[in-house]
Amino acid sequence: MKNNLAIVIPSYNEVKNVTILIKGIKRGFPAAEIIIVDDSLPKENGKLKRVLKNKKNIILISRLKKAGRGSAVLDGFRKALKDKNIEYVFEMDSDLAHDPKEMTRFIEKKNNGKYDLIIGSRYLPGGRIKNIAANRTIMSRVINKFLFYWLGMHLTDHTSGFRLYSRKAVKFLVNSRIQSKGFITLSETAYKLYLKKYPIGEVPITWNYRIYGKSNVNLGELFNSLFFVIKMRIKN
Ligand SMILES: Nc1nc2c(ncn2[C@@H]2O[C@H](COP(=O)(O)OP(=O)(O)O)[C@@H](O)[C@H]2O)c(=O)[nH]1
Ligand SMILES: [Mg+2]
């Protein structure tokens, strides 16, 4: 049978994490097409290239400039669509926040309900957050509650980067003129799909704080993102 699964992974200075992550993916999904969209500068990107050399079913897109998690994933989506056999497209972080063992839960839900997007939620009953400072969890929860009411889209986790899309949804998104570039693209893409009435579901996930490397979120991007989603609803 032809492989019908692609996994898009944005990365920025994550050589060590990516090395571990792809091993985990290959254990469960040996034939999946893994598309890594890396924005590291040439030196770090070179290290990643060496690690991935001669590995099967891995495509590395090297952008060599930090251009945002959201835009990286969209470039990965475009690449996934080039393969006509791909029907399921995952996106997941490269920093081991998301456990590839949980991917089957998404696939089962999608197959049972004809969803176009399944979001891995930290806040659904059964979902968990491990090893992170309480203040960040509280901030994330507050933002998600706000988005729940402001966008009127009743999801528990709008900004989770562990997701499964149908081919149809991916095709729609790459042609949707997405305006944002960073992590808030997660909210923008979900909202675009919601407005067009694509069925969206959630499954609980366990989210892990990174052990290696450092987080890219900062207060500046956080505020810009909040303004962005406020404007996004007003425009629609
Ligand atoms: N390609 C690319 N990936 C990014 C960028 N910013 C963040 N990432 C990746 O997106 C994922 C989530 O970012 P992270 O810094 O862990 O955010 P946090 O989990 O909210 O602390 C990680 O896998 C990062 O490597 C970017 O500008 N470009
Ligand atoms: Mg992270």
Image (cartoon, rainbow, N blue to C red):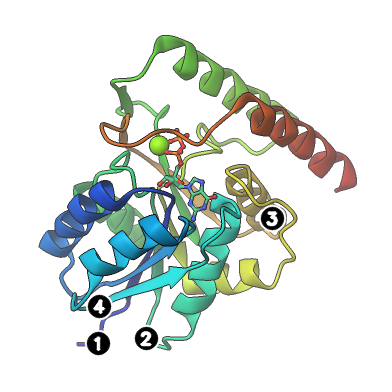
Instruction: State the image coordinates of residue 225 (x, y, percent, origin top left).
Output: 70, 36
Q: Secondary structure at mark 3?
A: helix
Find the distance from the CA under tag 1 to the CA under tag 2: 7 Å
CB atoms of marks 4 and 2 within 8 Å: no
Q: What residue sits right under mark 2 in the picture? A: 85
Which quarter of the image is occupied by the N terminus? bottom left
Along the polypeptide, which appears first: circle 4 or circle 3? 4
Q: What residue sits right under mark 1 in the picture? A: 2
Q: What residue sits right under mark 3 in the picture? A: 192
Q: Quadrant of residue 53?
A: bottom left
Q: Secondary structure at mark 2?
A: loop
CB atoms of marks 3 and 1 within 8 Å: no
CB atoms of marks 1 and 2 within 8 Å: yes
Does residue 91 lie above or below 122 as drawn?
A: below
Residue 141: mark in rendering:
none
Query: Of the residues shown, which amino acid type is indicated by label 3?
Result: Lys
Q: Secondary structure at mark 1?
A: loop
- Inspect this view and state whether residue 151 appears: no
Q: Residue at x 11, y 61 (%)?
A: 27
Q: Nearer the viewer, mark 4 or mark 3?
A: 4
